[in-house]
């Protein structure tokens, strides 16, 4: 019989992050699903905590002393000392438009001079202007731009990103964007969830017959995207002058028939009925909601739709209408936060900055903003079982912050406090 040498015995623990002064786990014992109401303030904080990692997954979470005592540390276990700092789950950005050509600095200036976002769009600017630049760009050019965006997001502490198409608006260009997004998911450390947003705007060539564009989306784009497996979600910009609720409904029915999950840009600039549509179709999330009606909030809650709020676009467009975050939370609607990173309404790629804006503009508390940018954001992209909290079995995605307290993340506005980002168990 071979005797095992207990000193060099095998340990499944590949890394331990220890001595986290504040370990924010976002665990709520016995609770599955997105957090609502007061649950959004329950962060599951462990003082002097540690996380044991086995390969790409979280193995155990506890106080440092207890964890080290109870686990076998092998000679290959990497010890990462947080030296008393704040440690949280990797942040999750559930709403971004990261792949596009050109920029719209000219429109930024036009808006400062008093022009309105929708007015600029009607005159051929806005999304249409980015569509022209994106159609012209090669896949390589789009990839290089997108890669910089994803790398910057990772550096700021975001480890899972939802990315939408929507600047191609014909089958070929939409597929070009989705392929770039999928490639970024393979090549970068970030987990990327892809969304088809062919219904982002009526392209110039269909301006006089928008219903024909809806027919193209449903007859050609969705079937192609679904058969190539390029997207998990389908999104639509339901807005006055863009896609009506009637047109949105047709797109949503088709997407659902082809097995795509649903998201919707709802009630951003006008109360259009997007929230109600999200509820009717059982969408995973309804996003923006700055002009949402009471009935929409009520129906979303009933249908289990998550509200993804995007204070970046409210700030950039200097909108007076703001999503009623306080009311939503108090009513028990789960709220998530996203950057909405895009070249028009939100050239903001920092989720920590978005948390600051949610606190200041939407009166969310720092705890709620962190819950909204982690576990609730994970549920908003149907990844609640994989990320968003430090739970054994989930992906080992963590951030060590140059801070002692979670409130500092939204408090130090515009700073990047992420010191060490760990994705799938590896430091990046
Ligand atoms: O989420 N609202 C529609 N789509 C984007 C804006 C896109 C753009 O301006 O390029 C948004 O805000
Ligand atoms: Fe958006």
Image (cartoon, rainbow, N blue to C red):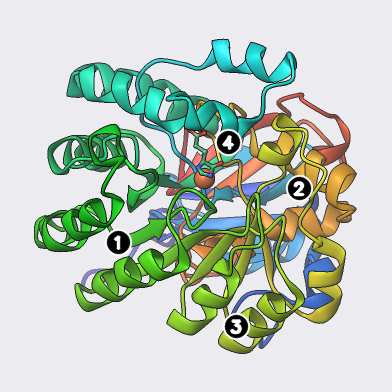
Q: Distance of mark 1 from mark 3, alpha carbons?
A: 22 Å
Question: Where residue 76 sits in the image (x, y, percent)?
Answer: 42, 44
For the residue pair 293 and 348, the one nearer the viewer reads as 293
Q: CA distance from mark 4 to mark 2?
A: 47 Å
Q: Are marks 3 and 4 in contact (CB under 8 Å)?
A: no
Q: State the residue position of label 1.
A: 232
Query: Relative to residue 33, is residue 180 drawn left or right?
Result: left
337 left or right, relative to 9: right
| Residue at the spot 53% in from the left edge and 67% down from the top edge | 285
Q: In which quarter of the view is residue 100 placed?
A: top left
Callouts 2 and 1 close, C-beta under 8 Å: no
Left or right: 401 as drawn, with respect to 342: right
Rendering coords of residue 130 (x, y %):
39, 25
Dot 1 beta carbon under 8 Å from ligand 2: no
Foreground residue, 134 or 31? 134
* Residue 32 - label: 3
């Amino acid at each position: 019989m071979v005797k095992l040498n207990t000193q060099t015995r095998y340990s499944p623990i590949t890394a331990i992050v220890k001595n986290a002064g504040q370990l924010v786990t976002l665990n709520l014992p016995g609770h599955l699903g997105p957090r609502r109401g007061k649950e959004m303030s329950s962060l599951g904080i462990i003082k002097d905590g540690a996380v044991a990692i086995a390969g790409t997954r979280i193995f155990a979470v506890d106080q440092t002393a207890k964890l080290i005592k109870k686990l076998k540390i092998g000679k290959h276990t990497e010890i990462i000392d947080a030296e008393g700092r704040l440690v949280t789950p990797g942040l999750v950005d559930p709403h971004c438009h990261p792949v596009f050509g050109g920029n719209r600095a000219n429109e930024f200036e036009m808006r400062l001079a008093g022009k309105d976002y929708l007015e600029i769009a009607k005159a051929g600017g806005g999304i249409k202007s980015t569509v022209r630049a994106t159609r012209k760009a090669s896949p390589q050019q789009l990839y290089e731009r997108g890669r910089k965006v994803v790398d910057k997001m990772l550096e700021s502490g975001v480890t899972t990103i939802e990315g939408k198409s929507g600047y191609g608006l014909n089958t070929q260009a939409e597929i070009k964007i989705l392929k770039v997004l999928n490639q970024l998911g393979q090549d970068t450390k970030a987990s990327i969830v892809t969304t088809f947003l062919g219904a982002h705007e009526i392209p110039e060539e269909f301006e006089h017959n928008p219903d024909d564009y809806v027919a193209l989306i449903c007859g050609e784009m969705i079937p192609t995207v679904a058969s190539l497996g390029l997207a998990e979600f389908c999104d639509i910009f339901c807005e006055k002058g863009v896609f009506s609720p009637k047109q949105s409904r047709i797109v949503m029915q088709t997407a659902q028939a082809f097995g795509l999950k649903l998201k919707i840009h709802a009630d951003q600039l006008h109360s259009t009925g997007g929230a109600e549509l999200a509820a009717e179709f059982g969408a995973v999330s309804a996003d923006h909601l700055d002009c949402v009606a009471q009935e929409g909030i009520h129906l979303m809650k009933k249908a289990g739709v998550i509200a993804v709020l995007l204070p970046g676009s409210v700030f950039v467009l200097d909108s007076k209408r703001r999503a009623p975050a306080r009311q939503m939370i108090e009513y028990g609607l789960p709220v998530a936060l996203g950057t909405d990173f895009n070249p028009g309404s939100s050239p903001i790629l920092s989720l920590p900055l978005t948390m600051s804006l949610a606190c200041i503009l939407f009166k969310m508390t720092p705890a709620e903003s962190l819950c909204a940018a982690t576990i609730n954001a994970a549920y908003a992209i149907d990844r609640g079982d994989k990320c968003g909290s430090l739970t054994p079995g989930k992906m080992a995605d963590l951030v060590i912050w140059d801070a002692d307290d979670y409130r500092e993340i939204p408090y130090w506005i515009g700073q990047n406090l992420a010191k060490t980002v760990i994705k799938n168990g590896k430091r990046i």
